[in-house]
């Protein structure tokens, strides 16, 4: 069958306790924070090239929303320091 073994162990789909027990046993992968230089690079490339934020997400392997947040935060920091 295509169902995972965990689904077969449950008496019903609404057994929240079993689901919590399953998730507690799994290790979570936590990523490292994006450094200052790694934040500045896509921002400068965005300003220099005029490319869209989505096209910047591919070479840096960063999500579209993350690229958008990085550009916004970096430009806000640059603006607040200079003006």
Image (cartoon, rainbow, N blue to C red):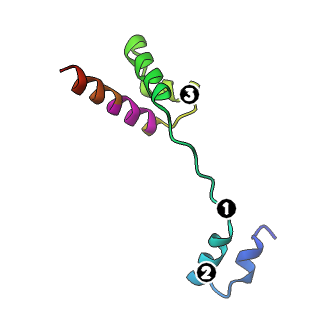
Q: Is residue 80 above or below residue 21?
A: above
Residue 22 locus on image (x, y percent): 66, 74
Residue where numbered disc 1 is placed: 27
Quadrant housing residue 20: bottom right
**What residue do we see at 53% from left, 34% from top?**
62
Task: Assess whether residue 58 is covered by the magenta stretch.
Answer: no
Residue where numbered disc 2 is placed: 13
The C terminus - image quarter? top left
Label 1 and label 3: CA atoms lie apart by 26 Å
Mark before the other along the chain sequence, 2 or 1: 2
Question: Residue 73 vs residue 27: left or right?
Answer: left
Outermost residue, right side = 1
Q: Is residue 66 above or below residue 27?
A: above
Label 2 and label 1: CA atoms lie apart by 23 Å
Secondary structure category for the residue under label 2: loop
- SS assignment for the magenta stretch, majority: helix
Secondary structure category for the residue under label 3: helix
**Marks 2 and 1: which is nearer the front?**
1
Give the extent of the magenta segment: 66-73
Outermost residue, top side = 48
Q: Which mark is residue 51?
A: none
Mark before the other along the chain sequence, 1 or 3: 1
Residue 44 locus on image (x, y percent): 41, 17
Outermost residue, left side = 83
In this view of the protein, can residue 14 be seen by the observer?
no
**What residue do we see at 43% from left, 23% from top?**
40
Q: Is residue 39 above or below residue 9?
A: above
**Marks 1 and 3: which is nearer the front?**
1
Residue where numbered disc 3 is placed: 60
Quadrant housing residue 47: top left
**What residue do we see at 22% from left, 27% from top?**
80
Question: Residue 3 vs residue 55: left or right?
Answer: right
């Amino acid at each position: 069958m295509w169902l995972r073994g965990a689904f077969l162990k449950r008496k019903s789909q609404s057994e929240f306790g079993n689901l919590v027990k399953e998730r507690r046993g799994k290790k979570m992968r936590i990523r490292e924070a994006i450094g200052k230089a790694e934040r500045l690079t896509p921002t400068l490339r965005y300003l220099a090239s005029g490319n869209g934020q989505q096209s910047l997400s591919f070479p840096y392997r960063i999500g579209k929303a993350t690229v958008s947040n990085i550009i916004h935060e970096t430009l806000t920091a640059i603006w607040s320091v200079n003006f």
